[in-house]
Image (spheres, rainbow, N blue to C red):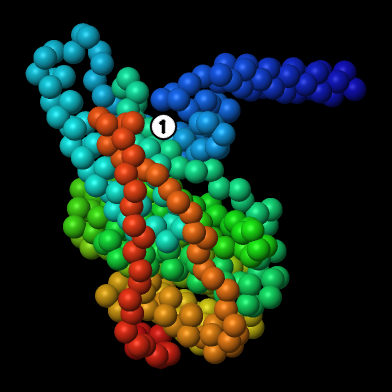
Amino acid sequence: MIKIGMRQINRFAKQQCFFQTCFRQVIESMGEMINKYELLNPFQSRNAGFSRWTLAKKGERLFFLKELIDPKYPDEELLSESIRAGRIKECEKFEKEKSRLYSAINTASDGNLVRLIEFFRVDSRYYVSSYWIDQANINLKRIARMDLKDKLLLCRTAVHSLAALHEQRIVHADIKDTNVLIHKTKNESLVTKIVDFDCSFFEDTPPDNEDDLGGDQVYLSPEACLFLCGEEAELTCKMDVFALGILLHQFLTGEIPYFDSEKYDYAHEAVLDDVILKADTADIPLPVRRIIENMLLKDPQKRISAKEVYFLLTSFYNQTYPVSRPLIEKEEVEISTKPSDMDKETKTSSSRLRMSKEFFQKPGDL
C-alpha cells in the first residue's frame, strides 16, 4: 500500500510539474507580438513537419502562424564575413523560391485551397501566415457514416483544390487527413480545406535529397518511398494523387484500402511488391471504385490525374444527384509574399479548371 501510495504521489507531482510548465508557456506567449501578430498560444511542433505553428490574432481576425525551422538568417556577429555572406545568399535564394511558390499557390486557390496571407522574416526566423480554419467536429469514422451524396461532396472539393494546385505544376507532397481539413460552410455543408505547404515544390524543382522530402508514411506514394530509400524516382503531382486516393477511400469507408497488414506496414510497400490495391466493394459504387483504384496504381505515368478524377467524380455525382451544390466559398483575400516588402499586399486571381470529356474505364485503362 505504501509503495502504491508513493507511486500515486510521484505521478501527481509529475502531472503538476507538467501543467505548471504548460501554464508558464501560455503566460509567456500571451501578448507576444511577431510582425503585428499577437500569439495566443505557444508555438508547437505537433503535425508540423518542417515548422512550428500557433494560433495568432491580427486586428479582429484569427490566423494560423508558422515559424519555419530552416533556414535561419545569419545574425551571429561571430561569423566570418565569408560564411555570413554565403548564408545570406542561401536565404535570398530561399526567399525567392518561397515567394514564387506561395504566389502560385494563391493564384491556384479555388477558395478551398487555403491561401497564404503573409511570408516574412523577423530577425533570423521566417514566418508564413494563413487564415485560421474552423474545423468541423467530425472524424473519418463519422464521415464514412454520412450519406453518399455528402461524402462525394467532400471528395469533390478536395480533388478540385488539388487539381487547381496541379494546374500550376505544384506538388503538395504531404496530402493526409490532418492537412485536408473538414469545414462547415454557412449553408451547413461540409467541404474540405487543403492546408500546409511546407513540403510543397514545383515539379521542375523537386527536392535534391531525401532529407528535403516530407510526407506521411500512411499516404506515401511508391515513388516517394523509392526516393526516400535513395533510389532513382521521378517526383511529380501523381504523388499527391496516390495520397488522395487513400484519403478518399477513408472518407467513403472510414478505412484505408485493404492490404495484408501482417506482411506490409504501409500501402506503398504493398504496391511496390506489385499488390494491386482494391477499393471496398460494399460502401463504394462501382464507378467511384474504379476512379480510386486508378489513383492507386504503382506506375505514376499510368495513374489518373487529379483533373481526370475531378471530372469523373463530378460526372457520377451529377448523374446520381442532378441538382448539385456549389463547391467553393468565395472569399476576398489580400496577400503579401515578399519578405523584404511585408507591408505591401497584392491581389491574386483564382484559376479555373478546363477539362476534355472523359469516361469511366477499368483500373489501368485511363
> Residue 185 in the image: x percent, y percent?
61, 59
Is 204 left or right of 237, judged from the image as shown? left
Query: With respect to residue 306, does 229 lie above or below?
Result: above
Query: In terms of depth relative to the viewer, which is nearer, 209 or 306?
Result: 306
What x and y, as percent, mark residue 74?
Answer: 24, 20
Residue located at (37% from left, 43% from top):
335
- Residue, x 48% and y 21% (percent of image)? 33
Observer-nearest of 289 and 277: 289
Depth check: give the residue in front, 349 or 79.
349
Specify the quadrant that holds the N terminus. Answer: top right
Residue holding disc 1: 67
The reply to whether residue 123 is in sight is yes
Reply above or below: 274 against 143: below
Q: Position of residue 239 (x, y in %)?
A: 35, 63
* Residue farthest left in this picture: 82
Please indicate whether residue 234 sits to the left or right of residue 256 in the image: left
* Quadrant assignment, res 358: bottom left
Element carrying mark 1: strand
- The quadrant of the image that shows the C terminus is bottom left
265 vs 30, left or right, is left
Query: Which residue lies at the image location 23% right of the left edge and 63% below the top edge?
Result: 234
